[in-house]
Image (tube, rainbow, N blue to C red):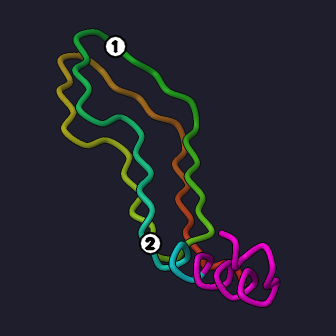
Amino acid sequence: MTQMKVDPHLTAQLQDLINQIQAQNPTLQIVLDTVRIRGNVELGNIEQMSETASTEQIIGRNLGVGGDLKIGDITQKAQRKE
C-alpha cells in the first residue's frame, strides 16, 4: 500500500491488471433457479445483458412446475465491451 501511495505508475499498472483479470472472469446470471411452482405463474419479459463475453446466462434451471408457467419475451446478450 505504501508503494502504491508513492508510485502512481505502479498503481495504474495494478489497476490495469485487475481490470484484465475481471474481464476474463466468467459471469453468471440466473433467473428462476431451483423454484417449485404449484399453481399458475406469469412472468413479464426477461432481459439479461452482460458486457463480459464469458457470461453464462440461465433462465429456468431445476424448475418444478405443477401448474402453468408463462414467461414473456426473453432476451439474452453477452458481448465484450470494447
- Drawn side of residue 27 relative to residue 1, left or right: left
Q: Earlier in the sequence, mark 2 or mark 1?
A: 2
Q: Residue at x 22, y 11 (%)?
A: 38
Location of residue 11 with respect to 50 vertically, above or below: below
Q: Residue at x 38, y 46 (%)?
A: 59
Q: Which residue is mark 2?
A: 25
Quadrant of the image occupied by residue 51: bottom right
* Magenta stretch prevailing secondary structure: helix
**What element does badge 2 sit on?**
loop
- Image coords of residue 41 (percent x, y): 39, 18
Quadrant in which the N terminus is drawn: bottom right
Q: How many C-alpha atoms fall within 10 Å of the one at disc 2: few (<14), some, or many (≥20)?
A: few
Q: Amino acid at mark 1?
A: Asn
Q: How many C-alpha atoms fall within 10 Å of the one at disc 1: few (<14), some, or many (≥20)?
A: few
Q: Which residue is mark 1?
A: 40
Location of residue 79 with respect to 59 vertically, above or below: below
Q: Nearer the viewer, residue 1 or 47?
A: 1
- Image coords of residue 71 (percent x, y): 45, 34
- Image coords of residue 30 (percent x, y): 40, 45
Location of residue 50 with respect to 48 vertically, above or below: below
- Drawn side of residue 44 relative to residue 71, left or right: right
**Which contiguous range is marked in magenta?**
1-19
Q: Amino acid at mark 2?
A: Asn
Q: Nearer the viewer, residue 45 or 4?
A: 4
Marks 2/1: CA–CA distance: 37 Å
- Image coords of residue 72 (percent x, y): 52, 37
